[in-house]
Image: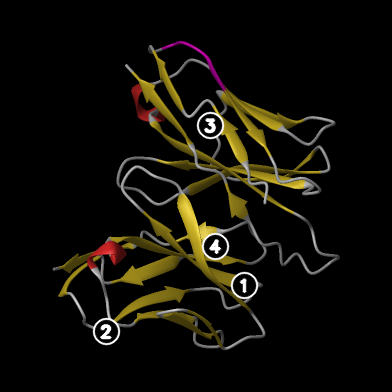
Amino acid sequence: AAGVIQSPRHLIKEKRETATLKCYPIPRHDTVYWYQQGPGQDPQFLISFYEKMQSDKGSIPDRFSAQQFSDYHSELNMSSLELGDSALYFCASSRRQGGSGANVLTFGAGSRLTVL
Amino acid sequence: KQEVTQIPAALSVPEGENLVLNCSFTDSAIYNLQWFRQDPGKGLTSLLLIQSSQREQTSGRLNASLDKSSGRSTLYIAASQPGDSATYLCAVTGNTPLVFGKGTRLSVIA
């Protein structure tokens, strides 16, 4: 079965540079979520999109932006990178189930960003 | 704001032991609870999903229970093996997207 695809798997950037992470959800999934997991930390919710519109916003820095495109893939853009942005970035997707909101998330393998 | 707590933070057991990992959450208005496994530096593997209307789920040697009213879940691992060594994360979905606990780091010693 198709899974959530994230690219690149590894990325090394210098401080103040810009990085873009991509996420391709499971086919027919309409919602995408981004999480950030720092070293030794639990994953923290950044932002989510449903049908190409932002649906929830978590602890996403103002230096970061994201969007979901017409083919439902999503990109997380990170600018003015700081050392503290070094983390695993997970994307997850789900298919909204009616009005229950009981979405089951499937996670990608993650993109590891290292900022030097 | 939903908060998820996992106890203990770390656990070391000899191979073959049965063990229990605990998870508690502050807001009982959840839709579901998931247990994940994470190997160092790797992705999140979903182990078990319990819908809010369910009391437990089983998969092989794993059994997860949910007491929504008290805001608690347990993950029971039977006959532990060295390959079970990993961090186990509990996460709940409610009015906000999945909120994770900090995990329990399990080491199973051969």
Q: Which residue is mark 3?
A: A61
Image coords of residue B77 (percent x, y): 34, 79
SS class of the residue under badge 4?
loop
Q: Residues within 10 Å of mark 1 (few under 14, many from 20)?
A: many
Q: Are discs 3 and 4 both within one chain? A: no
Magenta stretch: residue A39 in it? no
Dividing the picture into quarters, in which one does residue B105 lie? bottom left
Is residue B13 positioned above or below B45 on the image? below
Q: Which residue is mark 1?
A: B32
Whole-Å distance between the Cαs marked 3 and 2? 42 Å
Can I make out residue B105 in this image? no
Residue type, label 3? Pro
Is residue B79 positioned above or below A110 on the image? below
Residue type, label 4? Lys
Give the residue displayed 67% in from the left and 46% down from the top.
Answer: A2
Q: Identify the chain of the residue marked 4, using the numbered disc in the image.
A: B
SS class of the residue under badge 1?
strand
Nearer to us: label 1 or label 2: 2
Q: Are discs 3 and 1 both within one chain? A: no
Quarter of the picture holding the N terminus of chain B? bottom right
Tell me whether circle 3 and circle 4 mark residues in contact (CB < 8 Å). Answer: no
Whole-Å distance between the Cαs marked 2 and 4? 33 Å
